[in-house]
Every structure is written in C-alpha cells, then in structure tokens.
Image (spheres, rainbow, N blue to C red):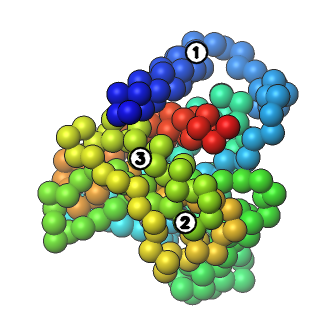
Amino acid sequence: MILLIKRRWLIAGTAVVLAAVTLLCVRNVPSKEAFSALSDTRRPVVILDAGHGGEDGGAVSADGVAESQINLKIVQKTDLLLTFLGRDTLLTRSGEDAVYSPEAKTLREKKVSDLKNRVAMVNAAEDAVLISVHQNSLPVHPAVHGAQVFYNTILPADQMAQTIQSTLNGLINPGNDKAAKAIDGTIYLMKEITRPGILVECGFLSNQKETQQLQSDDYQSKLALAIVSGYLEYETNKG
Ligand SMILES: [Zn+2]
C-alpha cells in the first residue's frame, strides 16, 4: 500500500515536473482559457490563499523573516503549476497587501475585514476548494520542523489533506513523516467557509535551518510541486 501510494505520487510528481519544465521551455504558453476548454469534466476552482499580508506579517522568525511573503511566493508557484495543468484558480491576494475593505482603520478592524473578505470569496464560488498556505512557529521547541496539513469539517477536505500530506512527507519531510489533522475549530477562515478547505503549514520559522530553506526559490518550488502533486492524486482518487 505504501509502495503503491509512493509510486502514484511519484507519477503525479513527474507529470508536474514535466509540465513545469515545459512551461519554462515553451515561449508561447497557451492561455488559461485554452486549457480550460480542453478539460472534459467540470473541476472545482482551486482557491489559493496566501496567509496574512500588509501590516499582518503572521509568524516571524528570530531574525525577522515574516511568513506573509513566503506564503505569497509558494502560492504564486502553486498557481503557475495548477494553471498550466488546466485548473481554474483564484487567489485571495496576489500582492503583498492584505484584502481588508477601505472602511477598516485600526489593525484589528483590518484583520477582521481581511478574513471576512477571504471567507466571502471562498463561499461565493459555487464549486471550489481552498488551499491556504501558512508557516508555523514553535519557539519553545526550535528543533521542530517540517510541513503539515490541516483540514476543515467539509468533506472531502480530509482526503485532500491526506494526499497532500503524503506528497509533502515524500518531498519535504523525509524521515520526519507527519499526519494530516483536523484543524482547530477556532481558526476563523477554516471555520466559516462552506467549501472543503485545507491549511498547509509549510515549515517552522522557529527552526533556523528551515527558515533559510523556506526563503529559497528552489525550496518554495519543491513545496508547490508537492502541493500540486498531492492535489492531482486527490482528484484522481475521488473520481
Ligand atoms: Zn499564518
């Protein structure tokens, strides 16, 4: 079973690598619409959420590296791969700024407005799944590292989380396997959305080595590749 799973995600991973290489080599990349037209079955929109943004940097490493920028880079790479593979995507934010409404003035108002707008975007999509990207931090245990996926209560978020965790374990967590887990019910975005949603904690900014890796373009690409490979595996499994 384990061998089978590993072989399957390797195949999915190879397909994504080939897609990525082709993307880098081909000058005239067909439009997103052209790829969508090739699709013979209706697939959900994949909403990609780069956690935090603007004044809200999220978790910050001891030397001042904030998660918001890392989240955005991983989301942009994931978007590039999924789009190339013909999936429809939406980004909750495509720049450094958070997505609060203009009437929000204080930091707290901005944070609340930002989260409400993200929830509204997800719930407005008729058929969608959410992949939210964050970085973790556990300063009291600086040795803890690795990527872990959490899922909300809307099925089949658990399946999506498990397949993406499996590819992350293979590519990012060798010798440090983690299990996908149900998310804490207090996480507003994941609690309020009415679509299947997962939150990927890509690594720990409290771990010095991992903080260095998370800032590297190659490592961010590897994370995006693992997320997309796992997503394709999920798509295949759920039929
Ligand atoms: Zn975060």
- Residue located 79% across and 28% down the image: 39
- Depth check: 111 or 167 in front? 167
- Spatial separation of the CA atoms under disc 2 and disc 3: 14 Å
- Residue located 65% across and 28% down the image: 84
- Which of discs 1 and 3 lies nearer the camera? The answer is 3
For mark 2, give the secondary structure: loop
For mark 1, give the secondary structure: helix
Q: Is 107 drawn above or below residue 99 in the view shown?
A: below
Pick whichever of labels 1 and 3 is earlier in the sequence.
1
- Depth check: 22 or 158 in front? 158
Q: Which residue is mark 1?
A: 22
Note whether ligand 1 is within 8 Å of mark 3. Answer: no
Quadrant including the N terminus = top left
Pick whichever of labels 2 and 3 is earlier in the sequence.
2
For mark 3, give the secondary structure: helix
Q: Are marks 1 and 3 in contact (CB under 8 Å)?
A: no
- Residue located 66% across and 83% down the image: 104
**In the rendered structure, which amino acid carries the disc numbered 1?**
Thr
Q: Which residue is mark 3?
A: 165
**In the rendered structure, which amino acid carries the disc numbered 2?**
Asn
- Which of discs 2 and 1 lies nearer the camera? The answer is 2
Q: Which residue is mark 2?
A: 152
- In the picture as drawn, the residue positioned furthest to the right comes out as 37
Residue 6, by quadrant, is top left
Q: Is 88 drawn above or below residue 96 in the view shown?
A: above
- In the picture as drawn, the residue positioned furthest to the front comes out as 1
Quadrant including the C terminus = top right
Pick whichever of labels 2 and 1 is earlier in the sequence.
1
